[in-house]
Amino acid sequence: MSDDRDPEATLREWKESMQAEHAEAIANPDPDADHAVEAVVQPSERIRFGYEGGELVEQERERIEADEPELFACACGVHGMTRKEAREHLAAVRD
Ligand SMILES: [Zn+2]
């Protein structure tokens, strides 16, 4: 009654804001931080969440194939970058 927001829209907005922040962090590295790839993560599972009765709950868990791209983490704290994003991030530091 009081909350008639579409949960899908809420999740979509959250994802978009996360992606915008992520893209911003990649494109504009913090000039005061050290930048160097410090970790590579090879995810083995993808977990999907959805809303049920207003609660965000796990709905599905799937194994990720070995050829999924690994994710890079920078020493400045930016994580979850693809190889391409990591390259862009480090290139932006040098600009
Ligand atoms: Zn960095």
Image (cartoon, rainbow, N blue to C red):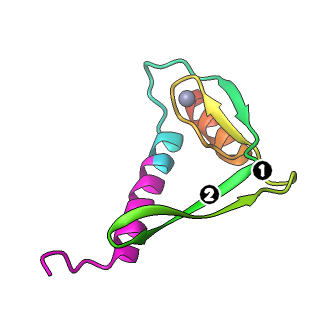
Residue 85: in sight, yes or no? Answer: yes
Within 10 Å of disc 1 (Cα), the crowding (few <14, some 14-19, many 20+) is some
Foreground of the two, 89 or 42: 42
Residue named by callout 1 = 69
Residue 89 lies in the magenta stretch: no
Magenta segment, which residues?
1-21
Callout 1 amino acid: Pro
Q: Residue at x 73, y 44 (%)?
A: 83
Residue 7: % across, % down: 35, 74
Foreground of the two, 78 or 2: 2
- Position of residue 95 relative to residue 48, above or below, is above
Looking at the rendering, the quadrant in which ligand 1 lies is top right
User: In which image quadrant can residue 43 be found?
Assistant: top right
Residue 9 lies in the magenta stretch: yes
Q: Residue at x 71, y 47 (%)?
A: 84
Residue named by callout 2 = 47
Q: Label 2 near label 1: C-beta < 8 Å?
A: no
Callout 2 amino acid: Ile
Alpha carbons under labels 1 and 2: distance apart:
16 Å
